[in-house]
Amino acid sequence: MLEILADNNFGDTRSGDGLAGPMALLLILLLAAATVFLIRNMNQRLRRLPETFDSASMSDGARTDSPVTPDPR
């Protein structure tokens, strides 16, 4: 009974190149580096945003002093 439970059903792990461990480590390190760079980039973009978004800072110059109402049809 113990021999059936101890069988290696995933193939012979002692032969072959054995690249699964190093490749997984490389993939984890690449994902971690990409995450760090994305967080740094997003922080830089958030710092460039203005404190408030008022109507005077609109890029097209159109001022909306009153709220926009939908067309009643």
Image (tube, rainbow, N blue to C red):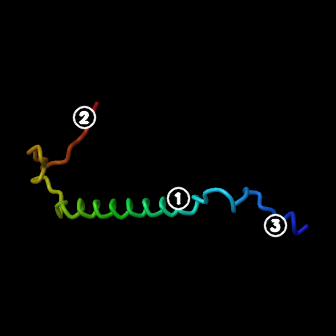
* Badge 3 vs badge 2, beta-carbon distance below 8 Å: no
Residue shown at the point (23%, 41%) measured from the top left: 69
The residue singled out by tag 3 in the image is 6
Residue shown at the point (86%, 63%) measured from the top left: 4
- Residue 29 vs 57, above or below: the answer is below
Crowdedness near tag 1: few (<14), some (14–19) or many (≥20) residues, C-alpha within 10 Å: few
Q: Amino acid at mark 2?
A: Asp
Residue shown at the point (44%, 64%) measured from the top left: 29
The disc placed on residue 2 is none
Q: Quadrant of residue 33?
A: bottom left
Q: Nearer the viewer, residue 72 or 36?
A: 36
The disc placed on residue 23 is 1
Q: Is residue 33 left or right of residue 69?
A: right
The residue singled out by tag 2 in the image is 71
Where is residue 42? Give x, y as percent. 29, 60
Q: Quadrant of the N terminus?
A: bottom right
Q: Nearer the viewer, mark 2 or mark 1?
A: 1
Q: Is residue 40 left or right of residue 12?
A: left
* Badge 3 vs badge 1, beta-carbon distance below 8 Å: no
Q: Amino acid at mark 3?
A: Ala
